[in-house]
Amino acid sequence: MATDFKLSAIDRSFADFICRESGNAPPVLWRLASLVSSMVANASICLDLADIGGRLIRVNGEDLAMPPLDDLREILRKTAVVGSPGDFRPLILDDGDRLYLYRYWKYERDLARVVLEKAASNCVLPDPGLLSSGFGRLFPATGEGIDWQQAAALAALRKRFCIISGGPGTGKTSTVVKILALLLEQAKGQPLRIALAAPTGKAAARLMESINRMKAGLACEESVKELIPRDVSTIHRLLGARHASVRFRYSELNPLPFDMVIVDEASMVALPLMAKLAVALKQEARLILLGDRDQLASVEAGAVLGDLCGAGRRELFSAEFRTLHAALCGANMPMEVDGETTPPLGDSLVVLKKNYRFRDESGIGALAMLINGGRGAEALALIGSSGSADLTWRAVPPADGLKKALVDIIIDGYGSFLTAGSAREALQRFDGFRVLCAMRQGPYGVSSINALVEEILASKGLIEPHKRWYRGRPVMVTANDYNLKLFNGDIGIVFPDPDADGKALVHFPTPEGDVRTVSPLRLPAHETVYAMTIHKSQGSEFERLLMLLPAHDVDVVTRELIYTGITRARSRVEIWGRDDLFVTAVARKIERKSGLSEALWPGC
Protein backbone atom coordinates (compact mmCIF):
# COMPACT_ATOMS: atom_id res chain seq x y z
CA MET A 1 0.00 0.00 0.00
CA ALA A 2 1.31 3.46 -0.92
CA THR A 3 2.52 5.73 1.91
CA ASP A 4 0.04 8.59 2.20
CA PHE A 5 1.16 12.23 2.51
CA LYS A 6 -1.04 15.30 2.80
CA LEU A 7 0.70 18.54 1.89
CA SER A 8 -0.37 21.88 3.32
CA ALA A 9 0.09 25.31 1.80
CA ILE A 10 3.09 25.81 4.11
CA ASP A 11 4.69 22.60 2.84
CA ARG A 12 4.31 23.75 -0.76
CA SER A 13 5.60 27.24 0.00
CA PHE A 14 8.64 25.78 1.75
CA ALA A 15 9.37 23.57 -1.26
CA ASP A 16 9.08 26.61 -3.55
CA PHE A 17 11.60 28.46 -1.38
CA ILE A 18 14.06 25.55 -1.40
CA CYS A 19 13.91 25.28 -5.18
CA ARG A 20 14.45 29.03 -5.60
CA GLU A 21 17.48 28.88 -3.32
CA SER A 22 18.84 25.85 -5.17
CA GLY A 23 18.76 27.43 -8.62
CA ASN A 24 18.44 24.77 -11.28
CA ALA A 25 16.69 22.31 -9.03
CA PRO A 26 15.63 18.88 -10.31
CA PRO A 27 11.83 18.39 -10.02
CA VAL A 28 12.22 15.73 -7.34
CA LEU A 29 13.81 18.26 -4.97
CA TRP A 30 10.50 20.10 -4.72
CA ARG A 31 8.80 16.85 -3.84
CA LEU A 32 11.35 15.89 -1.17
CA ALA A 33 11.36 19.36 0.40
CA SER A 34 7.57 19.37 0.64
CA LEU A 35 7.57 15.87 2.13
CA VAL A 36 10.12 16.63 4.86
CA SER A 37 8.13 19.74 5.78
CA SER A 38 4.98 17.62 5.97
CA MET A 39 6.71 15.04 8.17
CA VAL A 40 7.73 17.68 10.72
CA ALA A 41 4.23 19.17 10.68
CA ASN A 42 2.95 15.68 11.53
CA ALA A 43 5.31 15.32 14.53
CA SER A 44 8.21 13.41 12.95
CA ILE A 45 11.72 14.85 13.02
CA CYS A 46 12.86 13.79 9.55
CA LEU A 47 11.97 12.04 6.30
CA ASP A 48 13.46 8.55 5.95
CA LEU A 49 14.35 8.16 2.28
CA ALA A 50 14.33 4.38 2.66
CA ASP A 51 10.55 4.60 3.17
CA ILE A 52 9.95 6.21 -0.21
CA GLY A 53 12.93 5.35 -2.44
CA GLY A 54 11.78 3.27 -5.45
CA ARG A 55 8.25 3.11 -4.07
CA LEU A 56 4.81 4.38 -4.88
CA ILE A 57 3.61 7.18 -2.62
CA ARG A 58 0.31 9.01 -2.48
CA VAL A 59 0.39 12.79 -2.16
CA ASN A 60 -2.93 14.56 -1.61
CA GLY A 61 -4.71 11.64 -3.24
CA GLU A 62 -2.39 11.37 -6.26
CA ASP A 63 -0.16 8.30 -6.74
CA LEU A 64 3.48 9.11 -7.54
CA ALA A 65 6.41 6.78 -8.30
CA MET A 66 9.60 7.87 -6.54
CA PRO A 67 13.12 7.31 -7.92
CA PRO A 68 15.28 4.58 -6.34
CA LEU A 69 17.01 5.35 -3.04
CA ASP A 70 20.48 5.61 -4.65
CA ASP A 71 19.17 8.16 -7.14
CA LEU A 72 17.48 10.23 -4.41
CA ARG A 73 20.67 10.25 -2.40
CA GLU A 74 22.76 11.35 -5.42
CA ILE A 75 20.31 14.09 -6.41
CA LEU A 76 20.30 15.56 -2.91
CA ARG A 77 24.09 15.43 -2.54
CA LYS A 78 24.48 17.52 -5.71
CA THR A 79 22.18 20.35 -4.64
CA ALA A 80 23.47 23.45 -2.90
CA VAL A 81 20.66 23.52 -0.34
CA VAL A 82 21.42 20.06 1.09
CA GLY A 83 24.36 19.50 3.40
CA SER A 84 25.87 16.75 5.50
CA PRO A 85 25.81 16.71 9.34
CA GLY A 86 27.84 19.70 10.51
CA ASP A 87 27.06 21.85 7.45
CA PHE A 88 24.89 24.94 7.69
CA ARG A 89 22.32 24.31 4.92
CA PRO A 90 18.52 24.45 4.86
CA LEU A 91 18.33 20.65 4.57
CA ILE A 92 20.61 18.01 6.08
CA LEU A 93 21.02 14.44 4.78
CA ASP A 94 22.70 12.14 7.29
CA ASP A 95 24.49 8.85 6.77
CA GLY A 96 21.32 6.93 7.58
CA ASP A 97 19.48 8.45 4.58
CA ARG A 98 17.39 10.67 6.84
CA LEU A 99 16.53 14.10 5.46
CA TYR A 100 16.08 16.88 8.03
CA LEU A 101 15.20 20.51 8.22
CA TYR A 102 18.43 22.02 9.56
CA ARG A 103 16.83 23.28 12.75
CA TYR A 104 15.46 19.86 13.67
CA TRP A 105 18.72 18.11 12.84
CA LYS A 106 20.43 20.53 15.22
CA TYR A 107 17.85 19.95 17.97
CA GLU A 108 18.40 16.20 17.68
CA ARG A 109 22.20 16.50 17.57
CA ASP A 110 22.31 18.92 20.54
CA LEU A 111 20.12 16.71 22.71
CA ALA A 112 22.06 13.55 21.84
CA ARG A 113 25.37 15.29 22.55
CA VAL A 114 24.36 16.56 25.99
CA VAL A 115 22.71 13.27 27.01
CA LEU A 116 25.70 11.17 25.95
CA GLU A 117 28.16 13.50 27.68
CA LYS A 118 26.21 13.42 30.94
CA ALA A 119 25.56 9.67 30.75
CA ALA A 120 29.30 9.05 30.36
CA SER A 121 30.07 11.04 33.51
CA ASN A 122 29.98 9.35 36.92
CA CYS A 123 29.37 11.48 39.99
CA VAL A 124 31.45 11.04 43.13
CA LEU A 125 29.54 9.65 46.10
CA PRO A 126 31.13 11.55 49.03
CA ASP A 127 29.96 9.27 51.85
CA PRO A 128 29.10 5.71 50.69
CA GLY A 129 28.42 4.64 54.28
CA LEU A 130 25.83 7.38 54.78
CA LEU A 131 24.36 6.56 51.38
CA SER A 132 24.00 2.88 52.24
CA SER A 133 22.32 3.86 55.49
CA GLY A 134 20.00 6.18 53.56
CA PHE A 135 19.01 3.40 51.18
CA GLY A 136 18.11 1.24 54.17
CA ARG A 137 16.02 3.97 55.79
CA LEU A 138 14.24 5.26 52.71
CA PHE A 139 13.84 1.95 50.89
CA PRO A 140 13.28 -0.64 53.63
CA ALA A 141 13.70 -4.24 52.49
CA THR A 142 10.52 -6.05 51.47
CA GLY A 143 11.97 -9.44 50.58
CA GLU A 144 10.48 -9.20 47.09
CA GLY A 145 13.72 -9.14 45.10
CA ILE A 146 15.16 -6.07 43.39
CA ASP A 147 13.73 -2.77 44.62
CA TRP A 148 13.68 -0.87 41.32
CA GLN A 149 12.93 2.41 43.05
CA GLN A 150 16.16 1.94 44.99
CA ALA A 151 18.03 1.10 41.76
CA ALA A 152 16.63 4.24 40.16
CA ALA A 153 17.83 6.31 43.11
CA LEU A 154 21.34 4.89 42.77
CA ALA A 155 21.37 5.64 39.05
CA ALA A 156 20.26 9.21 39.71
CA LEU A 157 23.02 9.73 42.28
CA ARG A 158 25.72 8.02 40.23
CA LYS A 159 25.03 9.50 36.78
CA ARG A 160 24.57 13.07 35.57
CA PHE A 161 21.73 11.88 33.33
CA CYS A 162 19.00 9.51 34.46
CA ILE A 163 15.59 8.42 33.20
CA ILE A 164 13.08 6.91 35.62
CA SER A 165 10.25 5.39 33.62
CA GLY A 166 7.16 3.59 34.82
CA GLY A 167 3.42 3.50 34.46
CA PRO A 168 0.95 5.28 36.76
CA GLY A 169 1.21 3.95 40.28
CA THR A 170 4.81 2.70 40.08
CA GLY A 171 6.08 5.41 42.43
CA LYS A 172 8.07 7.76 40.19
CA THR A 173 7.34 10.82 42.32
CA SER A 174 7.93 8.92 45.56
CA THR A 175 11.29 7.80 44.20
CA VAL A 176 12.38 11.29 43.23
CA VAL A 177 11.50 12.69 46.68
CA LYS A 178 13.77 10.06 48.22
CA ILE A 179 16.49 10.87 45.68
CA LEU A 180 16.36 14.49 46.79
CA ALA A 181 16.70 13.45 50.43
CA LEU A 182 19.70 11.23 49.63
CA LEU A 183 21.42 13.97 47.65
CA LEU A 184 20.87 16.55 50.35
CA GLU A 185 22.23 14.16 52.97
CA GLN A 186 25.33 13.62 50.84
CA ALA A 187 25.76 17.40 50.46
CA LYS A 188 26.01 17.73 54.28
CA GLY A 189 24.81 21.31 54.34
CA GLN A 190 26.66 22.46 51.23
CA PRO A 191 24.47 24.54 48.89
CA LEU A 192 22.69 22.43 46.28
CA ARG A 193 20.55 24.28 43.77
CA ILE A 194 17.67 22.09 42.56
CA ALA A 195 14.97 22.95 40.03
CA LEU A 196 11.75 20.97 39.60
CA ALA A 197 9.87 21.38 36.33
CA ALA A 198 7.07 19.94 34.20
CA PRO A 199 5.84 20.64 30.67
CA THR A 200 2.51 22.19 31.72
CA GLY A 201 1.25 24.27 34.61
CA LYS A 202 -1.18 21.52 35.59
CA ALA A 203 1.60 18.92 35.71
CA ALA A 204 3.79 21.32 37.69
CA ALA A 205 1.04 21.89 40.25
CA ARG A 206 0.46 18.14 40.63
CA LEU A 207 4.17 17.48 41.14
CA MET A 208 4.42 20.26 43.73
CA GLU A 209 1.39 18.91 45.59
CA SER A 210 2.79 15.36 45.58
CA ILE A 211 6.27 16.33 46.74
CA ASN A 212 5.02 18.56 49.53
CA ARG A 213 2.74 15.76 50.72
CA MET A 214 5.30 12.95 50.50
CA LYS A 215 8.30 14.61 52.07
CA ALA A 216 6.59 14.81 55.45
CA GLY A 217 6.82 11.03 55.78
CA LEU A 218 10.48 10.67 54.79
CA ALA A 219 12.79 8.78 57.14
CA CYS A 220 15.35 11.57 57.39
CA GLU A 221 16.18 14.62 59.48
CA GLU A 222 13.76 17.57 59.47
CA SER A 223 16.60 19.79 58.29
CA VAL A 224 16.87 17.68 55.13
CA LYS A 225 13.12 17.83 54.52
CA GLU A 226 13.23 21.62 54.78
CA LEU A 227 15.80 21.79 51.98
CA ILE A 228 13.64 19.84 49.51
CA PRO A 229 12.31 22.42 47.02
CA ARG A 230 8.70 23.47 47.49
CA ASP A 231 8.12 25.07 44.10
CA VAL A 232 7.74 23.53 40.66
CA SER A 233 7.93 25.53 37.44
CA THR A 234 6.93 24.93 33.86
CA ILE A 235 9.92 24.26 31.61
CA HIS A 236 9.16 27.43 29.67
CA ARG A 237 9.23 29.51 32.82
CA LEU A 238 12.37 27.77 34.07
CA LEU A 239 14.19 28.66 30.84
CA GLY A 240 12.93 32.24 30.91
CA ALA A 241 10.33 32.43 28.15
CA ARG A 242 10.21 35.73 26.29
CA HIS A 243 7.03 37.24 24.91
CA ALA A 244 6.53 36.60 21.17
CA SER A 245 9.91 34.86 20.87
CA VAL A 246 11.05 31.23 20.51
CA ARG A 247 14.29 32.12 22.31
CA PHE A 248 14.76 31.81 26.05
CA ARG A 249 16.71 33.80 28.60
CA TYR A 250 18.80 30.75 29.51
CA SER A 251 20.77 28.94 26.82
CA GLU A 252 24.13 27.37 26.12
CA LEU A 253 25.69 30.85 26.35
CA ASN A 254 23.82 31.70 29.55
CA PRO A 255 23.37 28.42 31.46
CA LEU A 256 20.81 27.74 34.14
CA PRO A 257 22.28 28.21 37.65
CA PHE A 258 21.09 24.83 38.96
CA ASP A 259 23.08 21.77 40.04
CA MET A 260 20.16 19.48 39.28
CA VAL A 261 17.03 19.75 37.13
CA ILE A 262 14.20 17.22 37.49
CA VAL A 263 11.48 17.08 34.82
CA ASP A 264 8.21 15.23 35.40
CA GLU A 265 5.84 14.02 32.65
CA ALA A 266 8.77 13.96 30.22
CA SER A 267 6.75 12.06 27.60
CA MET A 268 4.87 15.31 26.95
CA VAL A 269 8.02 17.29 26.08
CA ALA A 270 8.69 17.84 22.38
CA LEU A 271 12.17 17.69 20.86
CA PRO A 272 12.74 21.45 20.45
CA LEU A 273 11.97 22.21 24.11
CA MET A 274 13.94 19.23 25.44
CA ALA A 275 16.95 20.22 23.35
CA LYS A 276 16.80 23.82 24.56
CA LEU A 277 16.63 22.63 28.15
CA ALA A 278 19.55 20.23 27.68
CA VAL A 279 21.93 22.79 26.19
CA ALA A 280 21.01 25.31 28.91
CA LEU A 281 22.34 23.03 31.65
CA LYS A 282 25.74 23.54 33.21
CA GLN A 283 28.25 20.88 32.22
CA GLU A 284 28.34 19.48 35.75
CA ALA A 285 24.55 19.66 36.32
CA ARG A 286 22.42 16.56 36.70
CA LEU A 287 19.27 15.98 34.62
CA ILE A 288 16.61 13.52 35.79
CA LEU A 289 13.60 12.76 33.61
CA LEU A 290 10.46 11.11 34.97
CA GLY A 291 7.78 9.69 32.72
CA ASP A 292 5.98 6.74 31.20
CA ARG A 293 7.72 5.61 28.02
CA ASP A 294 4.55 3.78 26.90
CA GLN A 295 2.35 6.86 27.13
CA LEU A 296 1.37 9.22 24.32
CA ALA A 297 4.21 11.29 22.94
CA SER A 298 4.14 15.08 22.76
CA VAL A 299 1.64 16.83 20.51
CA GLU A 300 4.55 18.56 18.77
CA ALA A 301 7.53 17.04 16.95
CA GLY A 302 9.30 13.97 18.28
CA ALA A 303 8.79 11.06 20.64
CA VAL A 304 11.67 12.11 22.86
CA LEU A 305 11.14 10.01 25.96
CA GLY A 306 10.53 6.88 23.88
CA ASP A 307 13.72 7.53 21.90
CA LEU A 308 15.70 8.24 25.07
CA CYS A 309 14.49 4.92 26.46
CA GLY A 310 15.59 3.08 23.33
CA ALA A 311 12.05 2.49 22.05
CA GLY A 312 11.21 -0.02 24.79
CA ARG A 313 14.54 -1.87 24.98
CA ARG A 314 15.24 -3.64 28.24
CA GLU A 315 17.84 -2.28 30.65
CA LEU A 316 21.42 -3.51 30.37
CA PHE A 317 23.40 -2.46 33.45
CA SER A 318 27.20 -2.48 33.48
CA ALA A 319 29.21 -4.77 35.74
CA GLU A 320 30.45 -1.69 37.62
CA PHE A 321 26.90 -0.51 38.33
CA ARG A 322 25.76 -3.96 39.42
CA THR A 323 28.73 -4.23 41.78
CA LEU A 324 28.00 -0.80 43.26
CA HIS A 325 24.33 -1.68 43.64
CA ALA A 326 25.19 -4.91 45.48
CA ALA A 327 27.55 -3.04 47.81
CA LEU A 328 25.23 -0.17 48.68
CA CYS A 329 21.81 -1.77 48.36
CA GLY A 330 22.57 -5.38 49.25
CA ALA A 331 20.88 -6.97 46.22
CA ASN A 332 22.16 -8.57 43.03
CA MET A 333 20.89 -7.16 39.75
CA PRO A 334 20.25 -9.24 36.59
CA MET A 335 23.31 -10.15 34.52
CA GLU A 336 23.69 -9.31 30.83
CA VAL A 337 23.16 -12.03 28.29
CA ASP A 338 26.44 -13.42 26.92
CA GLY A 339 27.74 -11.28 24.10
CA GLU A 340 25.78 -8.16 25.05
CA THR A 341 27.62 -4.96 25.92
CA THR A 342 26.29 -2.12 28.01
CA PRO A 343 25.06 0.71 25.74
CA PRO A 344 25.94 4.35 26.53
CA LEU A 345 22.67 4.90 28.40
CA GLY A 346 22.62 1.45 29.99
CA ASP A 347 23.23 2.67 33.55
CA SER A 348 21.05 5.77 33.07
CA LEU A 349 17.70 4.09 32.43
CA VAL A 350 15.67 2.39 35.14
CA VAL A 351 12.12 1.15 34.57
CA LEU A 352 9.97 0.81 37.69
CA LYS A 353 8.19 -2.52 37.55
CA LYS A 354 6.06 -2.83 40.68
CA ASN A 355 2.67 -1.13 40.52
CA TYR A 356 1.29 0.10 43.84
CA ARG A 357 -2.02 1.27 42.36
CA PHE A 358 -2.95 -1.69 40.18
CA ARG A 359 -2.46 -4.86 42.21
CA ASP A 360 -2.12 -8.31 40.68
CA GLU A 361 -5.88 -8.78 40.65
CA SER A 362 -6.50 -5.42 38.95
CA GLY A 363 -8.21 -5.65 35.59
CA ILE A 364 -6.95 -2.19 34.63
CA GLY A 365 -3.34 -3.22 35.27
CA ALA A 366 -3.73 -6.45 33.29
CA LEU A 367 -5.44 -4.58 30.46
CA ALA A 368 -2.62 -2.01 30.30
CA MET A 369 -0.06 -4.81 29.94
CA LEU A 370 -2.01 -6.48 27.13
CA ILE A 371 -2.43 -3.21 25.27
CA ASN A 372 1.27 -2.37 25.59
CA GLY A 373 2.04 -5.81 24.16
CA GLY A 374 -0.21 -5.18 21.17
CA ARG A 375 -2.50 -8.05 22.18
CA GLY A 376 -5.79 -6.45 21.19
CA ALA A 377 -7.95 -9.57 20.96
CA GLU A 378 -6.85 -10.71 24.42
CA ALA A 379 -7.43 -7.22 25.80
CA LEU A 380 -10.94 -7.19 24.38
CA ALA A 381 -11.64 -10.62 25.87
CA LEU A 382 -10.43 -9.41 29.28
CA ILE A 383 -12.71 -6.37 29.21
CA GLY A 384 -15.67 -8.51 28.25
CA SER A 385 -15.05 -11.16 30.90
CA SER A 386 -17.10 -11.14 34.05
CA GLY A 387 -13.95 -11.66 36.13
CA SER A 388 -12.81 -8.01 35.85
CA ALA A 389 -15.08 -5.90 38.01
CA ASP A 390 -13.14 -2.73 37.20
CA LEU A 391 -13.58 -3.04 33.42
CA THR A 392 -16.70 -2.67 31.27
CA TRP A 393 -17.11 -2.87 27.50
CA ARG A 394 -20.06 -1.56 25.54
CA ALA A 395 -20.64 -1.33 21.80
CA VAL A 396 -20.52 2.34 20.83
CA PRO A 397 -23.95 3.51 19.67
CA PRO A 398 -24.50 5.38 16.40
CA ALA A 399 -24.16 9.15 16.60
CA ASP A 400 -27.91 9.73 16.72
CA GLY A 401 -28.21 7.35 19.66
CA LEU A 402 -25.40 8.78 21.78
CA LYS A 403 -27.45 11.14 23.90
CA LYS A 404 -29.93 8.46 25.00
CA ALA A 405 -27.08 6.01 25.71
CA LEU A 406 -25.18 8.53 27.82
CA VAL A 407 -27.99 9.57 30.16
CA ASP A 408 -27.47 7.07 32.99
CA ILE A 409 -23.67 7.20 33.15
CA ILE A 410 -23.62 11.02 32.95
CA ILE A 411 -26.17 11.49 35.73
CA ASP A 412 -24.39 8.93 37.88
CA GLY A 413 -20.94 10.38 37.14
CA TYR A 414 -21.64 14.10 37.42
CA GLY A 415 -24.70 14.34 39.65
CA SER A 416 -22.61 14.21 42.81
CA PHE A 417 -20.39 17.23 42.15
CA LEU A 418 -23.33 19.29 40.89
CA THR A 419 -25.15 18.82 44.20
CA ALA A 420 -22.12 19.68 46.33
CA GLY A 421 -22.59 22.25 49.05
CA SER A 422 -19.33 24.13 48.46
CA ALA A 423 -16.81 24.81 45.73
CA ARG A 424 -14.15 22.80 47.58
CA GLU A 425 -16.47 19.81 47.80
CA ALA A 426 -17.46 20.18 44.14
CA LEU A 427 -13.81 20.18 43.02
CA GLN A 428 -13.06 17.06 45.05
CA ARG A 429 -16.09 15.22 43.67
CA PHE A 430 -15.49 16.31 40.07
CA ASP A 431 -12.34 14.22 39.82
CA GLY A 432 -14.41 11.16 40.64
CA PHE A 433 -15.50 10.78 37.00
CA ARG A 434 -14.54 11.97 33.54
CA VAL A 435 -15.44 11.32 29.90
CA LEU A 436 -12.36 10.91 27.69
CA CYS A 437 -12.54 11.20 23.90
CA ALA A 438 -10.03 10.34 21.20
CA MET A 439 -10.72 13.46 19.14
CA ARG A 440 -11.84 17.04 19.52
CA GLN A 441 -14.28 17.22 16.60
CA GLY A 442 -16.95 14.97 15.13
CA PRO A 443 -19.94 13.30 16.77
CA TYR A 444 -17.65 11.34 19.12
CA GLY A 445 -15.37 14.29 19.81
CA VAL A 446 -15.05 16.55 22.83
CA SER A 447 -17.06 19.45 21.43
CA SER A 448 -20.12 17.34 20.60
CA ILE A 449 -19.99 15.28 23.79
CA ASN A 450 -19.74 18.36 26.01
CA ALA A 451 -22.85 19.75 24.33
CA LEU A 452 -24.72 16.45 24.83
CA VAL A 453 -23.70 16.30 28.50
CA GLU A 454 -25.03 19.80 29.09
CA GLU A 455 -28.34 18.84 27.44
CA ILE A 456 -28.63 15.74 29.63
CA LEU A 457 -27.81 17.57 32.87
CA ALA A 458 -30.17 20.42 31.99
CA SER A 459 -33.02 17.98 31.29
CA LYS A 460 -32.65 16.69 34.86
CA GLY A 461 -32.60 20.20 36.33
CA LEU A 462 -28.96 19.93 37.48
CA ILE A 463 -27.62 22.91 35.49
CA GLU A 464 -28.94 26.04 33.79
CA PRO A 465 -26.93 26.25 30.56
CA HIS A 466 -28.86 29.29 29.29
CA LYS A 467 -26.63 31.18 31.72
CA ARG A 468 -23.06 31.27 30.48
CA TRP A 469 -21.54 31.11 33.97
CA TYR A 470 -24.02 28.71 35.49
CA ARG A 471 -23.44 27.09 38.89
CA GLY A 472 -21.31 23.95 38.50
CA ARG A 473 -19.93 24.67 35.02
CA PRO A 474 -16.49 23.02 34.80
CA VAL A 475 -13.97 24.96 32.71
CA MET A 476 -10.48 24.10 31.52
CA VAL A 477 -7.92 26.80 30.81
CA THR A 478 -6.34 26.37 27.36
CA ALA A 479 -3.67 29.10 27.46
CA ASN A 480 -1.07 30.06 30.06
CA ASP A 481 -1.53 33.26 32.04
CA TYR A 482 1.50 33.77 34.27
CA ASN A 483 0.02 36.86 35.91
CA LEU A 484 -3.00 34.92 37.14
CA LYS A 485 -0.92 31.78 37.65
CA LEU A 486 -3.36 29.84 35.49
CA PHE A 487 -1.95 27.34 33.03
CA ASN A 488 -3.03 25.27 30.07
CA GLY A 489 -4.94 22.29 31.48
CA ASP A 490 -5.98 23.86 34.81
CA ILE A 491 -9.59 23.00 35.68
CA GLY A 492 -11.95 25.09 37.79
CA ILE A 493 -15.65 25.09 38.62
CA VAL A 494 -18.07 28.01 38.55
CA PHE A 495 -19.67 28.43 41.96
CA PRO A 496 -21.38 31.26 43.84
CA ASP A 497 -18.94 32.83 46.27
CA PRO A 498 -20.47 33.59 49.69
CA ASP A 499 -17.68 36.09 50.33
CA ALA A 500 -18.67 38.05 47.20
CA ASP A 501 -22.43 38.29 47.80
CA GLY A 502 -23.05 35.06 45.90
CA LYS A 503 -21.37 36.28 42.73
CA ALA A 504 -20.42 33.51 40.29
CA LEU A 505 -16.65 33.03 40.34
CA VAL A 506 -14.45 30.29 38.95
CA HIS A 507 -12.89 28.26 41.77
CA PHE A 508 -9.53 26.56 41.19
CA PRO A 509 -7.72 24.15 43.52
CA THR A 510 -4.27 25.18 44.72
CA PRO A 511 -1.27 22.85 45.19
CA GLU A 512 -1.52 23.50 48.94
CA GLY A 513 -5.04 22.03 49.02
CA ASP A 514 -6.87 25.35 49.21
CA VAL A 515 -9.26 26.97 46.73
CA ARG A 516 -8.78 30.30 45.00
CA THR A 517 -11.23 32.31 42.92
CA VAL A 518 -10.93 34.11 39.60
CA SER A 519 -13.50 36.35 37.96
CA PRO A 520 -14.87 34.79 34.75
CA LEU A 521 -14.08 38.07 33.00
CA ARG A 522 -10.36 37.62 33.70
CA LEU A 523 -10.05 34.02 32.54
CA PRO A 524 -7.63 33.31 29.70
CA ALA A 525 -8.85 31.13 26.83
CA HIS A 526 -10.96 28.27 28.19
CA GLU A 527 -13.63 25.69 27.40
CA THR A 528 -16.28 23.58 29.12
CA VAL A 529 -14.79 20.28 30.25
CA TYR A 530 -17.22 17.51 31.11
CA ALA A 531 -15.40 15.64 28.34
CA MET A 532 -11.73 16.08 27.45
CA THR A 533 -9.33 14.56 24.96
CA ILE A 534 -7.08 11.75 26.11
CA HIS A 535 -4.12 13.96 25.18
CA LYS A 536 -5.34 16.63 27.60
CA SER A 537 -5.88 14.04 30.34
CA GLN A 538 -2.18 13.20 30.58
CA GLY A 539 -0.93 13.73 34.12
CA SER A 540 -4.46 13.52 35.56
CA GLU A 541 -6.17 10.79 37.58
CA PHE A 542 -9.88 10.05 37.98
CA GLU A 543 -11.61 7.53 40.19
CA ARG A 544 -13.49 6.16 37.19
CA LEU A 545 -13.90 7.14 33.57
CA LEU A 546 -15.74 6.55 30.34
CA MET A 547 -13.47 6.29 27.30
CA LEU A 548 -15.46 6.95 24.15
CA LEU A 549 -13.90 5.64 20.93
CA PRO A 550 -15.29 6.64 17.51
CA ALA A 551 -17.47 4.27 15.48
CA HIS A 552 -15.15 4.55 12.47
CA ASP A 553 -11.43 3.88 12.00
CA VAL A 554 -9.25 6.90 12.73
CA ASP A 555 -5.44 6.91 12.55
CA VAL A 556 -5.09 8.89 15.78
CA VAL A 557 -6.61 6.03 17.78
CA THR A 558 -3.49 4.05 18.60
CA ARG A 559 -2.09 1.66 21.18
CA GLU A 560 -0.50 4.57 23.07
CA LEU A 561 -3.74 6.58 23.08
CA ILE A 562 -5.80 3.71 24.52
CA TYR A 563 -3.11 2.86 27.10
CA THR A 564 -2.90 6.49 28.20
CA GLY A 565 -6.67 6.74 28.49
CA ILE A 566 -7.29 3.63 30.60
CA THR A 567 -4.42 4.35 32.98
CA ARG A 568 -5.99 7.69 33.97
CA ALA A 569 -8.48 5.67 36.08
CA ARG A 570 -7.80 4.62 39.64
CA SER A 571 -10.62 2.11 40.11
CA ARG A 572 -12.91 1.66 37.10
CA VAL A 573 -12.88 2.04 33.30
CA GLU A 574 -15.80 1.77 30.91
CA ILE A 575 -14.95 1.69 27.21
CA TRP A 576 -17.40 2.26 24.38
CA GLY A 577 -16.15 1.17 20.99
CA ARG A 578 -16.29 -1.34 18.15
CA ASP A 579 -14.62 -4.70 18.68
CA ASP A 580 -12.81 -4.77 15.35
CA LEU A 581 -11.65 -1.17 15.55
CA PHE A 582 -10.37 -1.66 19.10
CA VAL A 583 -8.20 -4.60 18.02
CA THR A 584 -6.98 -2.61 15.01
CA ALA A 585 -6.10 0.38 17.21
CA VAL A 586 -4.13 -1.72 19.70
CA ALA A 587 -2.06 -3.06 16.80
CA ARG A 588 -1.36 0.48 15.54
CA LYS A 589 1.71 2.07 17.13
CA ILE A 590 2.68 5.69 16.81
CA GLU A 591 5.71 5.90 14.56
CA ARG A 592 7.63 9.15 14.47
CA LYS A 593 10.74 9.25 12.36
CA SER A 594 13.96 10.40 13.98
CA GLY A 595 17.59 9.45 14.41
CA LEU A 596 17.72 10.07 18.15
CA SER A 597 17.26 6.48 19.33
CA GLU A 598 19.96 5.24 16.96
CA ALA A 599 22.35 7.95 18.16
CA LEU A 600 21.81 7.06 21.82
CA TRP A 601 21.48 3.28 21.54
CA PRO A 602 23.91 2.32 18.73
CA GLY A 603 23.78 -1.31 17.70
CA CYS A 604 20.87 -2.12 20.04
Image (tube, rainbow, N blue to C red):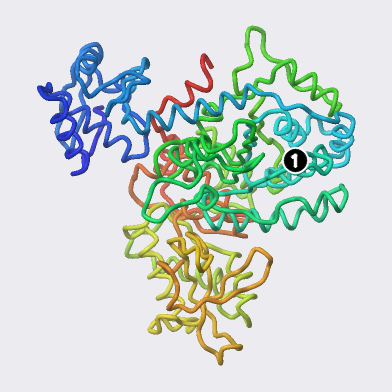
Residue kind at label 1, given as amino acid type: Ile
Q: Where in the figure is residue 213, as x and y percent of width and height?
A: 74, 58
Q: Where in the figure is residue 39, as x and y percent of width and height?
A: 31, 34
- Rendering quarter of residue 337: top right
Q: Residue at point 63% right, 39% down?
A: 166
Few, some or many C-alpha atoms within 10 Å of disc 1 (few <14, some 14-19, many ≥20)? many
Q: Residue at point 58% right, 40% down?
A: 292
In the image, residue 163 above or below residue 562: above
- Rendering quarter of residue 347: top right
Q: Is residue 331 left or right of residue 358?
A: right
Q: Where in the figure is residue 428, as x and y percent of width and height?
A: 63, 69
Can residue 371 be seen in the rendering of this structure? no
In the image, residue 8 above or below residue 124: below
For the residue pair 478 and 463, the one nearer the viewer reads as 478
Residue reaching furthest to the left: 24
> The C terminus appears in which quarter of the rendering?
top right
In the image, residue 246 above or below residue 16: below
Q: Where in the figure is residue 414, as x and y percent of width and height?
A: 54, 71
Q: Is residue 528 left or right of residue 192?
A: left
Q: Secondary structure at mark 1?
A: helix
For the residue pair 166 and 230, the one nearer the viewer reads as 230
For the residue pair 269 and 355, the one nearer the viewer reads as 269
User: Residue under circle 1?
Assistant: 179
In the image, residue 110 above or below residue 449: above
> The N terminus appears in which quarter of the rendering?
top left
Can residue 284 be seen in the rendering of this structure? yes
